[in-house]
Image (cartoon, rainbow, N blue to C red):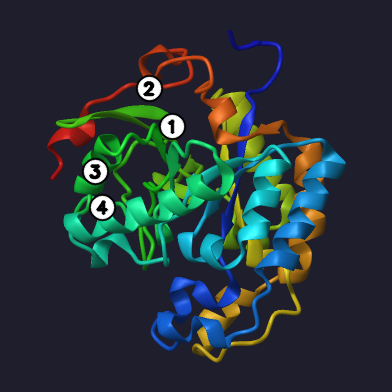
Amino acid sequence: MVNDSQPPINALSIDVEDYFQVEAFSGIIPRQDWRRFEPRIESNTTRLLDLFDQKGLKATFFILGWVAEHHQRLIRKISDCGHEIACHGYDHRLITSQTPETFRVDLRRARKILEDLTGEEVVGYRAPTYSINAKTLWALDILIEEGFRYDSSIFPIHHDRYGMPGAERSLHVIRREAGQIIEFPPSTIRMAGQNLPVAGGGYFRLLPYPMFRWCLKRINNIEGMPAMFMVHAWEVDPDQPVINGGRFNVWRHRINLDRTMPRLSQLLDDFRFAPVREVLYLNELEVTAIEPQMISSTAAYARMD
């Protein structure tokens, strides 16, 4: 049962992808050229592992299959440290650019690599660039059919690259023709009639830390909900090579990279965190047995596509 005397335990998640694999640079860096770039994923992820070890915390690592394939020892290290392994697709290909058939192939390929490396069942998924939206809800059916238990891809905001602003903000169950799946959306707060993103990533680097902390406290203490926080592994690396991907993209990618680690360290002191799977009690309970005060069950997405 939830202890009402304490705020909820929030989900701590890492998207394991390198600086040259982000969507902002996909138009100038073809996937076949990835091997030409200096990999920094191992050193950056190790910095995060060391920080979590210092804080005595575990997290969920949403890992690209491509990264796992080329950095196998790193993936085993993450697993051996007791962190949850989850799927981020194979090569950061947006679901909006895929068919149901190609998505299923991508999903199976990435998951098999992760499970073969770690011996751990992978039950969680996050789409590259949050690319499950109103037009790609069919991906949820495939996730259900493939045995995934939870998803963290539907960002209920307006954004130039992603978002589904009418979606549920809180942790909830989505019922589909194929069955049901838990959706743990990236966190937002409701303000001035809009959902404002406070899930981490660039928003964590851009907002003043006291404002970000206030937002998460509001989610925990006023709304009584666990937050979903995420950070990309490349965001802890201010010394990464500069990619000339256009002035705005470069600014958005690099802003305040030097502040990520100290802010993250402070955040982990200010709030309670655990891996997604632990927050959802997936080790002990079935999806339908999640405590009702934590999840708003809805069938709203069943008819949206």
Labels 2 and 1 touching (C-beta < 8 A):
yes
Q: Where 268 sits versus 63, above or below? A: above
**Residue at the image position 44 percent from the left and 72 percent from the top:** 23
Labels 1 and 3 touching (C-beta < 8 A):
no
Q: Secondary structure at mark 3?
A: helix
Specify whether residue 163 is in view.
no
Residue topped by disc 1: 170
Quarter of the rendering containing residue 182: top left
Residue topped by disc 2: 296
Residue 84: x and y in percent read 59, 39
Amino acid found under the numbered disc labelled 2 = Ser
**Residue at the image position 59 percent from the left and 85 percent from the top:** 37
Whole-angstrom CA distance, mark 2 to mark 1, is 7 Å
Residue 260: x and y in percent read 74, 61
Quarter of the rendering containing residue 263: bottom right
Camera-near label (4 vs 2) is 4
Among numbered discs 3 and 2, the one appearing first in the sequence: 3
Amino acid found under the numbered disc labelled 1 = Ser
Q: Where 44 sits versus 296, above or below? A: below
